[in-house]
Amino acid sequence: MKRPDGKVAGALIFVGAVQFILGMLVAECIYPNYSIANNYISDLGKLDAVSAPIFNTSVFLLGLLVTISAYFLRDFVRNKVFLSFLVLCGVGAMGVGTFPEDFGILHTTVSLIAFLFGALSAIASYKYQKPPLSYFAVILGLTSLVALALFATKVYLGLGKGGMERMIAYPVMLWAIAFGGHLIKE
């Protein structure tokens, strides 16, 4: 691995995840009567929402930075499946920012791509981290996949649809921050 390339990739993933978490938090605060239990995350990006410019820009930027990071990881990561998962996650996130909830099935499709391939990226990244971080990556990815299955079947476990959706998104964001930090350190 070219040392600067890994560090650049790590910085891109780290910055993408952190700015998205902060952007989502700001969007939740300015959206009138927003409930993290009862509202979908994507409600923040609806075209008529006051929070839409912040949320849609932030999620698009997340996707863009993750996608670009795959370019910088290409020499370090020999497993093209992992890189493909990372790119698909990034493209899905850019799609969420480009096609907000108002776009119906198109939005649902890109959201699924972002969620599914984000979780699979976390799991597939275990080869590029040392224990215990590699174990945490798998656990976070699996947590996200289980939450995705529950969410898809409308089993919310008392968390509400918004709470269960966050159980899909938050583990991947936590992994992204940790993985980005790991790459920066290497």
Image (cartoon, rainbow, N blue to C red):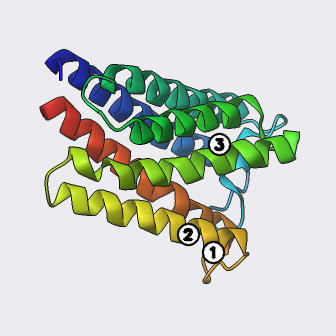
Q: Is residue 39 visible?
A: yes
Of marks 2 and 3, the one in the foreground: 2
The residue depicted at 39 percent of the width and 25 percent of the height is: 69
Q: Quadrant of the C terminus?
A: top left
Q: Is residue 155 left or right of residue 145?
A: right
**Farthest residue, direction bottom:** 157
Q: Quadrant of residue 45?
A: top right
For the residues labelled 2 and 3, say whether their Cβ atoms are less than 8 Å apart: no
Q: Residues within 10 Å of mark 2 (few under 14, many from 20)?
A: many
Q: Which mark is residue 30?
A: 3
Q: Which mark is residue 150?
A: 1
Q: Secondary structure at mark 2?
A: helix
Q: Residue 25 location, x and y as percent? A: 52, 45
Mark pair 2, 3: CA separation? 27 Å
Of marks 3 and 1, the one in the foreground: 1
Specify the amino acid type for callout 3. Ile
Q: Quadrant of residue 182?
A: top left
Question: In this orientation, which residue lies closer to the viewer: 166 or 52?
Answer: 166
Q: Give the mark nearer the N terminus: 2 vs 3.
A: 3
Specify the amino acid type for callout 1. Leu
Q: Residue 121 location, x and y as percent? A: 43, 47
Mark pair 3, 1: CA separation? 29 Å
Q: Residue 36 location, x and y as percent? A: 62, 62
For the residues labelled 1 and 2, say whether their Cβ atoms are less than 8 Å apart: yes
Q: Residue 175 location, x and y as percent? A: 35, 51
Question: In this orientation, which residue lies closer to the viewer: 77 or 33?
Answer: 77
Residue at label 2? Answer: 147
Q: How many marks overall?
A: 3
Q: Secondary structure at mark 3?
A: helix
Q: Secondary structure at mark 1?
A: helix
The residue depicted at 53 percent of the width and 24 percent of the height is: 64
Q: Residues within 10 Å of mark 1 (few under 14, many from 20)?
A: some
